[in-house]
Each structure stands twice: as C-alpha cells, then as structure tokens.
Image (spheres, rainbow, N blue to C red):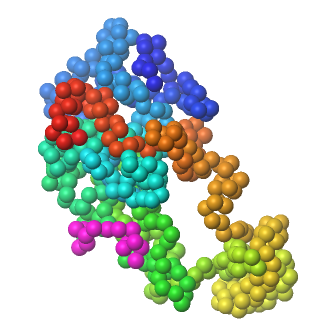
C-alpha cells in the first residue's frame, strides 16, 4: 500500500475500499494516533509530561503538521491492513501451538503480529513434517496451520543486542505473547514487570503448562501430558478400552482461544484505565475448565465419570450407531425428537414405553434402549437413515473423513478452505477462520511467513534502524 498524501490524511473511518471483492471500512486509528498528542500516563514525571505536551503542540497549518509526521514508522503503520484489530500490534515470542494459535486468531482479526524466531532454526513446528508445503524453507503443514497472517523476524534473545531489540519492539506494541518456562524471560530482562515499566499500557500474556504460581509452576507442559493429568483421557475412549487422547491437541488449541479472549478483555480494560496487565494462562487450568458438565457432575456427586465411548453421560440416545455400510451420529435432545426417531426406525412403541418415555428414564435404561435401536439402524445404509431422519427433523449426520469434510457443500459455502499467494509455492491452501464479522471480516490472504522474511522491514520501518545498524546485527548473528 502506498504511503498517504495530504488528501489521504483527512480520510474518515466511514471511507471504504475494495479488497479482494469484499468492501471493508478503513480504520484510521493508527494514523490518527500518530497525529494526535498523547495524554501522559499518571505515573510519568512532570518533565516527561512537558515533553509530551510540547511534542503534541498543533501547527497552525493542520495538513502541514500532519505531513511532517510521515516518518518511516508512520509509513510502516500506514501499510497495515484494515481489520477489527488493525489498531493492535502483537509481539509474538511464542512457539509451537497454544501461543501461535492465540496470535493467529488476533492476526485473522487484523492485528499486526510480529513473530520472533530463532535465527537459522525458527519455530520448532517448521520442522514438524511431513507433510510439507516447502521442506527447505521450513514450511511444514503444522507450521502453516498456526502462523498465517504474521510477520517473521529472527532474533537471538540470548544476546544483549537481541534483548534490546525486543524491548524496543515491546515499547511500540500493544500485546506481548510468550510461552517460555516461568522465570526464563526474567533472566533476560524481558518479563512483564520490566517491559510494563517501559510501556505501562502493555498487555503481556504468558502461556505455560501450569501457570505462574503453584507447586507445578516450574514444570514443562505438553498437550498430551495435560490431557491425561487434567482428566480428559479418563472420560475419552471405549468403556473397556484404554484411555484415549483427542485426535487434535485440543488443550493447546483451547488455551490459545482462552488466551486470545483474555488479551481482548485486557485491551478493553485498558481503554478505560490506560494500563495493561499480565494475562496468565495454564494448560492444566484450561483442561480442567473445559471438562464443563463432566467436571460439574463430579463436583455435585463426587463420583468420577468413566469412559462411555461415543455415548453421552446425560442424554440418550446421543451416540454413533453402526449402519449396514458405515456409521452415523444420532443426537436426540428431547422427547419429541425421540418419538420421531422411533417412528422412522419402525419402533413407535418405544416412545410409549415407560422406561424410555423421558430422557432420565432413557439414561437409566441406556443399555437396553441402545441395543434395540442399534439392531434396527444396522439393517439399512447410512444414506437412508440420514435422509429419513433429516426429513423427520431428528438431528443426525454422517461421520466424514477430511476429504468428505472439505467436499461438503456447507463447508465450501462458508469458505473454510482458503488459499493465499506464497513466495515459494505459488499458492498455499489453508483452513479459514470460523469467525464471521459483518463489517470487518477476518483476513485470509496473508500466508505464513518464511523464516525471517520481515526482519529488515520491521527493524528499519518500525524501529527506524539504519542499514548499517541492521547489517551490524546480521554480521553479529543477532538476527
């Protein structure tokens, strides 16, 4: 995007532009912030306040004054793409999944996300293949799935020069996200306390296995480990089988979602107070919280629930049933749906049976009922049952593999498979964001970055470094 001229500077938020066929409102928040005097923070000293006030003094010529502000940093900000969070800059020090999932969510919503990676190696997931988008450049399918929409810079945080760059970036950021072990960044002077002293409005999110406090705070945390420790595996799997993990790293993913929610809440609070805060996310906390009704049932009864396979502990019938050519899911949620299921299955008398007339009765007599229904459903093919049950408004559906998922017309209509131009492969297919916003839809056209792709751009454009300064960092293997 070109830098603005004088005519562009007076453009309002109501102005719109066409981007990839979608009309989007143009946010001027970043640019206006550059042209407005900043209110001093209550804790800043008088001399600093005077400097801030002097810096914000208005020139008689409004347009000339704003034109003076077209510095490299201003041009860098102007180049940011519009979105609901286009006024937010995120410094992403996280790796692997939970942290990157949080920052990818923010990037989808328009935030500028600057991902800091190790020189020469990058995020661990770059090497987690096959499959690959591009093996030589470290573009595994895993990395692609969690890093769209971001900028990548390389920086050695173990070096004082690298630490200083992080401090300068944090001073210009709204959010920092990190998932180092407790205390690791404190040794580098990059902990919340010290970065908040530089930028009191900073929202600093720490993601660890067990949180910043407690007897396990120093332990490393991994999704699989926490699925076991947090009880999920005790309720997942067949009753007579072994404990089973979920097919994706669900604890990591939900921790990322909770982290994004916490960050947005802290940013909303900052609008009222001007102060940021520390957001503390733990995989184990999230795993316990996501047990939802299962955990609440235990707290009420003090009886640990067991594994039920595909059955539901509190609703019957609500499970997968074998058909003559596969399996279907039946998800009956009330007595009316149950009566219609029985009609379609040719077993209308079951709805009148006192044992099965209510959900509570069906839960008590689960084994008998599921055996009777299973025998009937196994006699016909999946397509028959899905068409017949849908016609009777009984919730049901197929069990699709991923080829069938992405061929599904509803999935296609909702745009869940997207693609973006990529400098190495031409295009890269990706999974789209599930969030739908009527005025500022999430972005989907920025591919995951190559390692260090934006290092020079960020150091020169945002921090105002000279070519010589960047070259010195590169020669010293800091970047």
Above or below, 229 against 85 in this view is below
As for residue 245 lying within the magenta part, the answer is no
Q: In which quarter of the image is the C terminus?
A: top left
Instruction: Identify the residue at image location x=45%, y=65%.
Output: 249
Instruction: Identify the residue at image location x=68%, y=48%.
Output: 413
Above or below, 255 against 287 in this view is above
Bounds of the magenta segment:
215-228
Give coordinates of residue 192: x percent, y percent. Answer: 23, 50
Give coordinates of residue 449: x percent, y percent. Answer: 40, 42
Q: In terms of depth relative to the viewer, which is nearer, 447 or 224?
A: 447
Rendering quarter of residue 9:
top left
Instruction: Identify the residue at image location x=71%, y=68%.
Output: 397
Above or below, 386 against 28 in this view is below
Give coordinates of residue 166: x percent, y percent. Answer: 23, 42
Instruction: Identify the residue at image location x=13%, y=44%.
Output: 160
Rendering quarter of residue 396:
bottom right
Confirm whether residue 301 shows in the render.
Answer: no
Confirm whether residue 12 shows in the render.
Answer: yes
50 left or right, relative to 290: left
381 left or right, relative to 419: right
Q: In terms of depth relative to the viewer, which is nearer, 224 or 64?
A: 224
User: Which residue extends farthest front?
Assistant: 136
Please state the total of marks drawn on the protein image.
0
Q: In terms of depth relative to the viewer, which is nearer, 444 or 360?
A: 444
Give coordinates of residue 188: x percent, y percent. Answer: 16, 50
User: Which residue extends farthest top?
Assistant: 61
As for residue 223 lying within the magenta part, the answer is yes
Rendering quarter of residue 469:
top left
């Amino acid at each position: 995007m070109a830098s603005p001229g004088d005519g562009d500077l007076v453009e309002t938020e109501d102005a719109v532009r066409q981007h990839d066929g979608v009309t989007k409102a143009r946010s001027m928040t970043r640019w206006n912030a550059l042209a407005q005097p900043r209110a001093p923070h209550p804790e800043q000293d008088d001399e600093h306040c005077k400097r801030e006030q002097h810096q914000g003094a208005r020139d008689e010529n409004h347009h000339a004054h704003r034109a003076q502000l077209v510095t490299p940093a201003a041009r860098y900000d102007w180049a940011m793409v519009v979105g609901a969070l286009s006024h937010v800059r995120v410094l992403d020090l996280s790796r692997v999944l939970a942290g990157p999932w949080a920052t990818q969510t923010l990037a989808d919503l328009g935030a500028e996300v600057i991902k800091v990676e190790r020189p020469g190696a990058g995020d661990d997931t770059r090497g987690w293949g096959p499959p690959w988008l591009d093996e030589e450049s470290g573009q595994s399918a895993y990395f692609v799935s969690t890093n769209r929409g971001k900028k990548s810079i390389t920086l050695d945080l173990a070096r004082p020069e690298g630490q200083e760059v992080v401090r300068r970036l944090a001073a210009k950021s709204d959010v920092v996200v990190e998932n180092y072990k407790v205390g690791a960044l404190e040794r580098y002077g990059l902990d919340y306390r010290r970065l908040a002293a530089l930028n009191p409005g900073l929202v600093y999110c720490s993601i660890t296995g067990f949180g910043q406090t407690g007897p396990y705070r120093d332990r490393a945390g991994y999704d699989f480990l926490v699925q076991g420790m947090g009880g999920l595996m005790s309720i997942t799997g067949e009753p007579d089988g072994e404990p089973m993990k979920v097919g994706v790293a669900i604890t990591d993913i939900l921790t990322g979602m909770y982290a994004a929610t916490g960050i947005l809440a802290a940013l909303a609070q900052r609008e009222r107070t001007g102060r940021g805060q520390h957001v503390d996310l733990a995989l184990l906390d999230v795993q316990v919280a996501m047990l939802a009704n299962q955990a609440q049932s235990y707290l009420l009864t003090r009886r640990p629930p067991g594994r039920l396979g595909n059955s539901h502990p509190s609703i019957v019938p609500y499970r997968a049933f074998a058909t003559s050519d596969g399996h279907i899911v039946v998800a009956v949620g009330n007595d009316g749906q149950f009566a219609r299921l029985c009609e379609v299955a040719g077993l209308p008398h079951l709805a009148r049976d006192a044992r099965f007339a209510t959900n509570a009765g069906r839960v008590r007599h689960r084994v008998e009922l599921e055996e009777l229904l299973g025998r009937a459903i196994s006699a016909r093919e999946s397509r028959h049952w899905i068409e017949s049950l849908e016609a009777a408004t009984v919730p049901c559906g197929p069990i699709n593999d991923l080829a069938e998922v992405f061929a599904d017309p509803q999935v296609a209509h909702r745009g869940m498979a997207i693609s973006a131009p990529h400098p190495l492969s031409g295009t890269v297919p990706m999974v789209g964001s599930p969030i739908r916003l009527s005025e500022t839809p999430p972005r989907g056209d920025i591919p995951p970055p190559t390692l260090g792709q934006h290092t020079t751009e960020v150091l020169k454009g945002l921090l105002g470094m000279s070519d010589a300064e960047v070259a010195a960092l590169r020669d010293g293997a800091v970047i």
